[in-house]
Image (cartoon, rainbow, N blue to C red):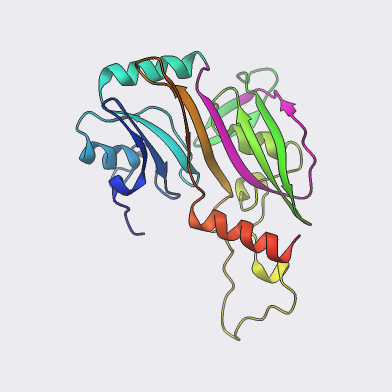
Amino acid sequence: MKIPKFADLILFENDDIIVVNKPPFISSLDEREGGEINMLRLAKQYSDDAQVCHRLDKETSGALIIAKNPEAYRAISMQFEKRQVKKIYHAVIEGTHVFENLFIDLPILNVGKGNVTISRQEGKRAETWFQSLKYFKHYTLVECRPVTGRMHQIRIHLATQRASIAGDEMYKGKPVFLSALKRKYHLGKDQEELPIMKRFALHAFEVSFKLLNGEEITIHAPYPKDFETLLKLLEKFDS
C-alpha cells in the first residue's frame, strides 16, 4: 500500500487542531503488533506533539480530528466526553431500507479481541440515528449519526436491522461484485473477479466541534475513490 503524504490528507488546520481525511486501511493508533504505519505516527512526523482525538476503524475512511498540543487534546477530549462532537457517517447497506430518522439504542458489550455484541444486560449505552439518503435496487446509501462512540457501533446497529454494510463480512455483509450488477459481465478465463470495494463501505463524512476559541466548525471529508466508484457503479447499473 502506498503511504499517503500527511499534508495531502489535511482538510483543516490551525495552531491547535488538524482534521484529516483518513484513508482506508490505515489504523488510527498504534496496533499491538507494532511495525505498521498509522495515523498517529504520520501526524507526529508532521507535528511533534500530535495526538489522535478519537478512532476510526482501520477500514473506515474519513474525518479524523488530531490535536497539535496537550491543551487542544484536552479540549477535544472533553467535547467527546460530553457528546458535543457531532459526527455523520455515510454507509452503503445491503437491501432497500427506508430509514426516516430511525433511532437504535441497543447496548453494546465489548467482548475483547476486536469483537462486540449486543447485550441488554451488560452492554454499554449505544445510540445511533439513521436516515436513508439514496435508494438503489439492491442497496441503500444511508446517513448514520452516532450519539455515543462505541466500538463497531454503526456496523452492529445496522446489522440488527438486517441492513449490513456492503463488504462488512464480520457482520454478514457481502462484497459487491460488478458481475452481480451488470448484465453480460464477462471475465477472462483465468481471471478472478475482485470486489468493487476491498473493504466495508463506511465513510466518516462530516465532523462538527468547537475550536479552542469557542468557534463552532463543521468539516466535510470527500469520499475516497473506492467509495465514489461504488456509488457511481450502483447509480449506473443498480438504479
Q: Name the residue at 70% across, 20% down.
A: 120
Quadrant of res 34: top left
* Most foreground residue, 203 or 115: 203
Above or below 24: residue 161: above
Q: Is 11 placed left or right of 41 in the picture?
A: right
Quadrant where the N terminus lies?
bottom left
Position in image of residue 84 (x %, y %): 51, 17
Read off the magenta span.
Answer: 83-108
Position in image of residue 209 (x %, y %): 46, 23
Is residue 239 within the magenta segment? no
* Most foreground residue, 30 or 55: 55
Above or below 183: residue 231: above
Q: Name the residue at 67% across, 50% down.
A: 173
Q: Is 212 placed left or right of 135 in the picture?
A: left
Quadrant where the C terminus lies?
bottom right
Above or below 85: residue 221: below
Position in image of residue 185 (x %, y %): 69, 78
* Most foreground residue, 77 or 57: 77
Farthest-out residue, front:
215
Q: Name the residue at 52% across, 39% down.
A: 204
Query: Does residue 12 appear in this view?
Result: yes
Above or below 112: residue 185: below
